[in-house]
Image (cartoon, rainbow, N blue to C red):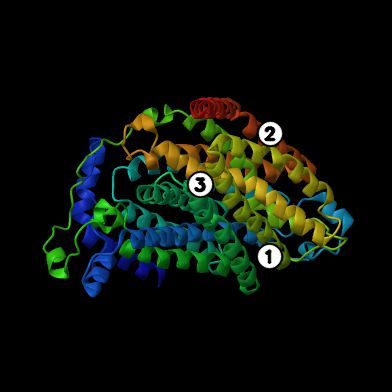
Amino acid sequence: MLSSLYNLIHGYLFYLQRNLLHKQFMASMEDEAPEAEVKPLGIRYIEYKRGSPISYKTYQAIVLSITFFAYLSYHTTRKTTSIVKSALDPQSSNLYTRRANPDHPSLKRKGWIPFNGPDGTALLGELDVSFLFVYAVGMYFSGHIGDRMDLRVFLTIGMVGTGIFTALFGIGYWANIHIFYYYLIVQMFAGLFQSTGWPSVIAVVGNWFGKKKRGLIMGVWNSHTSFGNIIGSIAASILLKYGWGWSMFVPGLLIILVALVVFLLLPVTPESVDAVLDDVHPKKTWEEMSREPLMKQKSVRHEPVGFLKAWKIPGVAPFALCLFFAKLVAYTFLYWLPFYISHTAINGRYLTDEESGNLSTLFDVGGVVGGILAGHISDRLDARAITAASFMYCSIPALFLYRSYGHISMTINIILMIITGVFVNGPYALITTAVSADLGTHSSLKGNARALATVTAIIDGTGSIGAAIGPLLTGYISAKSWSGVFTMLMVAALIAGLLLTRLVVAEVAEKIRGSGSEEVSRTTHDVHDV
């Protein structure tokens, strides 16, 4: 069934896009700008039924909605692995759990070979790092390719590939596969296809929205990451009772269905659908639109920005390095929080796998609040670096308090988990959205917007290397001490904040100069009034 669906989608994409893809591939080899994108079939159908073009604001709503659910589905498939871990490796090598509670439910289940042995936790850590390492490396190439071809097609291919390999991981359950390298290879390919998502959605949203209130808009929009984690956690926890394979297969099928919506409806740029701001163009009938060519040339064609040139854009390097450590913290929680909860007694009681998965979603609830709050504050202050650094510094005491006092009671655990989610995910969300979009349209590029995907890929790709290292180290350190894991996270948060010091100083100096200029202006105005 899955193979037939894949072949159908693949054939459909090939039939509709073969000529365009060939031209864009040749252009990318020569570092030339490809021709403009094809208007999506779904958009053409809607205009046919309406008899008139779609308004610019409606297009913006379509873009936000489709990219929101597209990346939500990416994170839904990504989160399921952390829930499945407890079923694959129930007999953790955590000595504290064995000694403190020999009757813990996880110690009575058999698990899944080869992850249920004494080195099971380390093997799961290797799966995480293989996925994230390929994801990080693939991110750099995805940004380069994304700036050179139709992002709608590129995103569709990435989502279908992600769905197939996520489902293949789950199929290992029914096929009774116990070979570690099968799961390793599947995770590596899943990471490769997952790397297409973020540069694509950020570039598309950046094409449709200016810098004004970008922090707040993208802060709200970026909640797809946390909502995807929440849905993935709840769905995987519920499906786990029917067999862990379902926890992987169902989300894999879901993202393939969302990919069809992306292919049919996502408008990549205003030019690709002939959209004009504020609807200043005269209304056209369907007959007039149907006589227009499918391919529309942009009035100004820019060359895609090279990889090294993108690194030299002011602010890209420090924010990329900051994100390295910020994602190390965030992704350690993403992949290991349910496991940590299930192996930590809260008020003297150990939670089941389903309870642990559901409780971990509150970290992402805090992440939603943190992303919106960080975006809003950075807009009001017009200071991205100050906001990101402040949140990173605040995450240090939050991490310490959660580790030290989270076990006292369920209420305290919930409160501290939400607070930790606010400060950990806030700067991560800000840097990967508004900051990436700002730098991708930096003034030094002189109006060339064809660096958005590349800059986004550099920043998030560098961050993803940290995201790979964090869960890997956790797999080894947690076997000896979870306190050691939290110490690592606090040090990483401190380094992340320090890496933005120069930008923070620059923003503070600019604020002081601005205040001085305003004071001089008011004094001059008062003198003239006298």
Residue located 26% across and 54% down the image: 276
Using the image, tell me which numbered label, if any, was put on residue 494: 2
Using the image, tell me which numbered label, if any, was put on residue 159: none
Give how far apart the Cα atoms at labels 2 and 3 are: 23 Å
Q: Position of residue 513 (x, y in %)?
A: 54, 25
Pair 1/2: label in front? 2
Q: Residues within 10 Å of mark 2 (few under 14, many from 20)?
A: some
Question: Does residue 92 show up?
Answer: no
Residue located 12% across and 69% down the image: 287
- Taking the view exactly as shown, the residue that stands out farthest to the front is 530
Q: Are marks 2 and 3 in contact (CB under 8 Å)?
A: no
Q: Amino acid at mark 2?
A: Leu
Image quarter hosting the N terminus: bottom left
Q: Earlier in the sequence, mark 1 or mark 3?
A: 3
Pair 1/3: label in front? 3
Q: Which residue is mark 3?
A: 215
Q: Which residue is mark 1?
A: 358
Residue 259 image-quadrant placement: bottom left
Give how far apart the Cα atoms at labels 1 and 2 are: 29 Å
Q: Position of residue 354 (x, y in %)?
A: 70, 67
Secondary element type, mark 3: helix
Q: Earlier in the sequence, mark 2 or mark 3?
A: 3
Q: Residues within 10 Å of mark 3 (few under 14, many from 20)?
A: many
